[in-house]
Image (cartoon, rainbow, N blue to C red):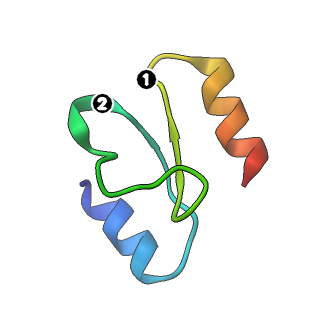
Amino acid sequence: MPTVACEAMMMHKTVVISNVCGVADDIIDDWNGFVFKAEDVDDLCRAIVKK
């Protein structure tokens, strides 16, 4: 997982992360963050609006 995502989680901030290369393995969608499909603008918008 990228460092910035870990730091955000430590500060109790919402994480919005793509599903590229397994970086989202520690994120459970709608529980501790939001996962979107890489290169899918509509899915990114869905994740941001849910936040």
At x 55% / y 17%, what residue is drawn? 40
At x 44% / y 71%, what residue is drawn? 8
The amino acid type of the residue labelled 1 equals Ala
Q: Which mark is residue 20?
A: 2
Instruction: Tell me the distance, in whole angstroms, between the alpha carbons under discs 2 and 1.
Output: 6 Å
Give the secondary structure at mark 1. loop
Position in image of residue 10 (x %, y %): 40, 81
Position in image of residue 45 (x %, y %): 70, 31
Question: Would residue 41 be found to the left or right of residue 2 on screen?
Answer: right
Position in image of residue 32 (x %, y %): 51, 65
Where is 23 relative to 11, above or below? above
Q: Rate crowding at label 1 as few (under 14), some (14 to 19) or many (20 or more) other CA atoms within 10 Å.
A: few
Quadrant into which the C terminus falls: bottom right
At x 43% / y 73%, what residue is drawn? 9
Q: Is mark 2 in CB contact (under 8 Å) with mark 1?
A: yes
Q: Which mark is residue 3?
A: none
At x 34% / y 46%, what residue is drawn? 24
The amino acid type of the residue labelled 2 equals Val
Chain-order first, disc 2 or disc 1: 2
Where is 41 relative to 12, above or below? above
Quadrant into which the N terminus falls: bottom left
Q: Which mark is residue 38?
A: 1
Q: Residue furthest bottom?
A: 11
Question: Would residue 26 be found to the left or right of residue 21 on screen?
Answer: right
Residue 47 figure quarter: top right
Question: Would residue 39 be found to the left or right of residue 34 on screen?
Answer: left
Position in image of residue 41 (x %, y %): 62, 19
Where is 7 relative to 44, above or below? below
Give the secondary structure at mark 2. helix
Where is 15 relative to 29, above or below? below
Q: Residue furthest right?
A: 49
